[in-house]
Amino acid sequence: MNDIVRIFDTTLRDGEQAPGASMTLAEKVMLAQLLDRMGVDILEAGFPVSSPHQFESVQAVAEAARRPVIAALARAVKVDLQAAIDALQGAQYPRIHTFIATSDIHLTAKFGEAKYGTTLAEKRRTILKMAVEAVQMARAFTSDVEFSAEDAGRTDPGYLCDVLAAVVEAGATTLNIPDTTGYCLPHEYGALFARVRAMIPDTRVVLSAHCHDDLGLATANSLAAVAAGARQVECTLNGLGERAGNASLEEVVMALHTRGEAFGVATNIVAAQLMDASRAAQQATGFPVAPNKAIVGRNAFAHEAGIHQHGILKNRATYEIMRPQDVGQDPDAGIRLGRHSGRAGLFSRLEKIGATLTSLNLDDIYERFVLLADRKKELYDTDLRHLLSSSSPDAVMPAYQLQHFRVLVETGQDPKADVTVFEKHEGTTSTTTGTGDGPVSALYSALDAATGQPHELVSYSIRSVSEGADAVGEVTALIGHSGAFFRGVARHTDVLQASAEAYLDALNQLEAYRNDRNGVRFAGEGIMSSFGG
Ligand code: MN
């Protein structure tokens, strides 16, 4: 029988403390419900005393998520504890999570006033007493009390043990030993847990890890703690959190699932929902994860290099230790075609989109593929259809090319735009105009007039991909037409230029798709009807 490591999600509390990551009440409730369904054991919903919003968030999450334990954070002072108790009144399984700093550096800086004592030894005694009293007060409200020794990672281990032993005596049921500053190395952090476990052998008292990624060690430290007896890990979706972030939930969970035999533990998380939860957190916070982010990044299971693609197509285990579907990623999205791809990857994708390879000149196609891949970052199915349908490299040039645009924005006036677009098939250049609620919508209505293709704009998003006043903006425009979707992406320091290019990129894909379909109809039912009619 494997031991269960409890997953304590603090995306809504420590995660939200990431500068700029604030979430609305509705977003928190939505995330809490996802985390509930995913099997999170404990959900830290907020820090009620800190603001009315935090207080209401804890109440709303306690109402919306009925299965997990709902934790509310409180400093080891009465006003905090009372706010946490009040906010948790409606919770099915309430937990008070109370904390106080124990490291000398925190004691000196945060408890400098004489009322806490004048010497370090006096301050240590005061802090220990405050911790015990806080746990007692929390315990009077609920039997589920967690105590955190803030900055435990830099606390004198002897004093840390004294505090932890005293709070267990006072009724704490979970002991969190946070590496608040992300300072510890895995072997040190593990040794700390081993020492505390030896002092408190009663496993009904759960030891908890809480790590930060300042040195990129949050996941490694969490795992070292598990190996040394921790049975709760505090973590956040996408590793959100203060500074470099907290331990990332998806990394900790998948390390324990993939290498469970190394630890003799399991978790209650339904890993196939990790991708959905990650996307929801990205959306709610506005923090996208890097493409190479472990587990949930867009490229986490993608292979572009030819030698890797060849191996993966024969047996995924050659280059993968987890299956994409295990974490909710799309297994078919894994083979990416770009300039590093080889013949195996290209031909496999061609077969997937319906090409009969035996009837094709494969050398010729591969050669044209390499030429095109040099010009485009990534090749999509529409590009491949072009490679198949034409022998001239010119055919892969997009149907519409933007030659010039102008946008006029003026107080009190609707923005106006005009665009000049070259249309390849007709060989003509035309200038069209449009207006809209904002500059982008004016630009898009002018491009609509230029291309005249029926479609709808499904979504538009813009994000900064570098920093500073001359930051590069990346625009993604998703358009749809009768059930098919096309995603255009463009980057530019001028976000209007990027907006126009992204939209035209999507329109070009739609145009290519439409031509392909027309081609198919002509070869199939089109021929029949021209004879029959
Ligand atoms: Mn923290």
Image: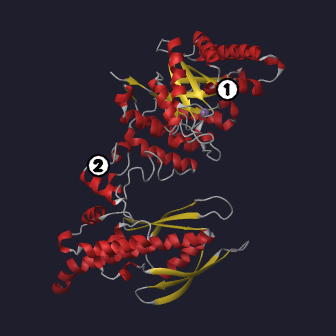
Would you place residue 342 above or below residue 111 in this image?
below
Disc 1 residue type (three-letter): Ala
Residue 43 percent across, percent down from the top left: 52, 31
Q: Residues within 10 Å of mark 2 (few under 14, many from 20)?
A: some
Q: Quadrant of residue 105?
A: top right
Q: Nearer the viewer, residue 134 or 176?
A: 176
Please give left or right for residue 214 compared with residue 459 in the image.
right
Hey, which residue is sitting farthest right in the picture?
114
Residue 136 percent across, percent down from the top left: 63, 13
Please give the residue where the numbered disc 2 appears in the rendered image: 316
Q: Quadrant of residue 340?
A: bottom left
Q: Nearer the viewer, residue 89 or 257?
A: 257
Q: Residue at x 60, y 44 (%)?
A: 24
Residue 501 percent across, percent down from the top left: 52, 73
Q: Residue at x 55, y 63 (%)?
A: 474
Please give the residue where the numbered disc 1 appears in the rendered image: 83
Asked which colour scheme the image uses, the reply is: secondary structure
